[in-house]
Amino acid sequence: MDTQPGRQRCAADADEVRGICVRHDRRADALIEILIDVQHARGCVADADVGVIAEALNLSLAEVHGVRSFYADFSTTPKGRCVVKLCRAEACQSVGSDALAEQLRARLGVEFGQTSRDGMHTLEAVYCLGNCALGPAAMVNGRLIGRADSERIDAMITEVGND
Amino acid sequence: MTEPVNAWLPADAAALSVGADAVAAALVTEAARRGVELRLKRTGSRGMMWLEPLLEVEVDGVRAGYGPLSPEDVPSLFAADFPAAESHPRCVGLVEEIPFLARQQRLTFARCGIIEPLDLDAYQAHGGLAGLQRAAGMAPERIVEAVTESGLRGRGGAGFPAGIKWRTVLEQAADRKYVCCNADEGDSGTFADRMLIEGDPFTLLEGMVIAGFATGASEGLVYVRSEYPHAIATLRRAIELWRDKGLLGADVLGSGRAFDITLRRGAGAYICGEESSMLESLEGRRGEVRVRPPIPAISGLFARPTVVNNVLTLATVPLLLADAAAPTRYAALGEGRSTGTQPFQLAGNIRRGGLVERAFGITLRELIEDFGGGTLSGRPVRAVQVGGPLGAWLPASSLDVAMTYEALAGVDAMLGHGGIVVFDDSVDMARMAEFAMAFCAEESCGKCTPCRIGAVRGAETLQKVRRGEHVADNIRLVEDLCEVMTDGSLCAMGGLTPMPVLSALKHFPEDFAPADDARTHHAAQVTS
Ligand SMILES: Cc1cc2nc3c(=O)[nH]c(=O)nc-3n(C[C@H](O)[C@H](O)[C@H](O)COP(=O)(O)O)c2cc1C
Ligand code: SF4
Ligand code: FES
């Protein structure tokens, strides 16, 4: 997985994106799936990728761009190596997720929706992770944390860093 | 000890979130160290989340429980006469005698937490496939009748009778029809869809195939939100397994009827739980809400007749088809037009959070106090939001309301997807009202003005109220905005956002008053 910030794109990148489109039979109705796979493989869906996808699926640039911008999971620039999502919805608020949000901002030195300058951490607000009886809930690179606090999130950041 | 020990530990995301895998690893290590033959199976969750990770071990043919377990508890567990370690501090006795579980009526969730999610033999041994096998020999009309007779209503939020929806799809003549399962489960305070998909995914597949047989659809799609990676992985394997076994494909169960299922992921948009927005997303587009009519049952996915049902609606179908008397038995449960059982979800600031499946009609108080044991913080319950972010806030004085569609409507509230979020007395309700508007602004699909602009204005105005600026005037402005949003929004996102806002204003006016002692007191608690 390549999530290096500011990495130059090349023909090989386009091939990878084209390959993802082919895996989905170049079906326009699979556009969201394709974007998810591109985001996952490349850490973002860059403007250049939008062009490649539009061509492969026979869609206009505007259509693909419009879809990319609608869904929160897609980013135009690479996310950090470690993506920390904190649930900020009601059930988690009731057990202190707002205070935890402040701690995380300070701890990681980034605002919600931003990536640290060294490309290590992205902090994101999400609305419900389906773990509302064990809040506050957080997710670090797809790993769910219940009864989250800064220590447990820190430990998970270290753990996924070693993966 | 020479006898092998049968044990079960959830691999449900909630259990994993509090360390179930580490407990599993410790169990395996410790068993090996002591020469105990441990037959550890990973299941879904029973839904007693405060006890997770909850280990179950077989003792004299029944299951005893230990929870919440940490890896550090494991050595002492083995030391204490394992598996019958009654004296161990984490022993919770026989699992099915725990009042939280014993007092439930588990129908939709009958197998969840008991069997391995992908064990087809265990599924059948516990009643699975009975509904599909029977439905395979029934005329579509008869299947629709059975579902109609049961009184089953949609569990996704709107509560529309499933049988009527299915009949509409059945009556359409079309080259293709679809069954779309809504697993977007975006409401805060809800996790039942996730639990079911992770713990008993075959039930959902079975319900979808039956829906296909009933309506003449041969393609099914499940739209699962991206926030549920564990559910996605389990469902994917479940679908593959069913294809391998001929339970999906060109000739399901040798019935001559075709049905296949595709999994599609969401990408972080609450509005995609709204059915027409979900259909747009399934077609590869922005999740913009469609104008009705037509309804999806007439023109849905790719303009074809489409059944759109929630996970729980579809997962309840198999048991309704299991035998001829099943619909009547189901319809006998509940109250009035709220028939059957509802998987309620106790969430937020609650001592014993989790899933409670009970017949409609149980009171909110019974759920929160008897099942939930009150708040986690030990402070008094002050406000409860029922039915997700678009649901009403109820004060502690309203807890005696019966949990039925009708009784909740009677107090200007709604059941939604059955989520119950409890707050203690540190909550600032003006803040929650502002949050409701801000959430709507964030998640609005942008198609209609009352919602797109109204929510932004609403959040701004409530901020002013919270700052104490022209409080009375600004509250009036919020009320006007709510009226415009209720009357003029295209869908329930904008149309129902006023529900949490107005209910907060109605039941907790003191939180919106110009700063006085009480208010400052609350604010101080919230920020502390
Ligand atoms: C903003 C909004 C979000 C919704 N989210 C969901 C959801 O996450 N899951 C769901 O099943 N229904 C959701 N619904 C309800 C669906 O539009 C639809 O009524 C439901 O999927 C139909 O299935 P049912 O009849 O089995 O409930 C939502 C509705 C709105 C307006
Ligand atoms: S009410 Fe909001 S979410 Fe619904 S269609 Fe209008 S803008 Fe979209
Ligand atoms: S509200 Fe936070 S996990 Fe559901």
Image (cartoon, grey):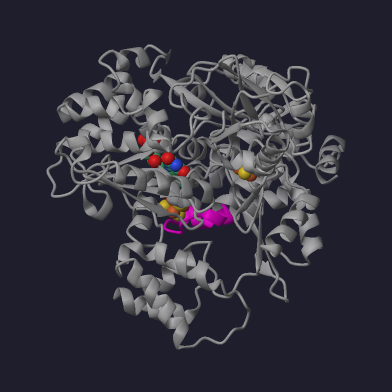
Q: Nearer the viewer, residue B37 or B280?
A: B37
Instruction: Give the quadrant of residue A133.
Output: top right
**Secondary structure that dominates the magenta span:** helix
Answer whether residue B424 is magenta in the image: no
Q: Quadrant of residue B173?
A: top left
B4 or B460: nearer the viewer? B4
Residue B387 appearing in the image: yes
Q: In the image, is B474 to the left or to the right of B231?
A: right
Front position in the image: B235 or B75: B75
- Split into 4 quadrants, where in the image is the C terminus of chain B? top right
Q: Position of residue B466 (x, y in %)?
A: 74, 47
Query: Which residue is depicted at the point 52% across and 51% down?
Result: B229
Over which residues does the magenta segment extend?
A: B441-456
Q: Using residue B118 as the reference point, say whether residue B113 is left or right of it.
A: right
Q: Quarter of the picture for ligand 3?
A: top right
Q: Is residue B260 above or below residue B350?
A: below
Residue at the spot 32% in from the left edge and 59% down from the top edge = B283
Q: Position of residue A141 (x, y in %)?
A: 62, 59
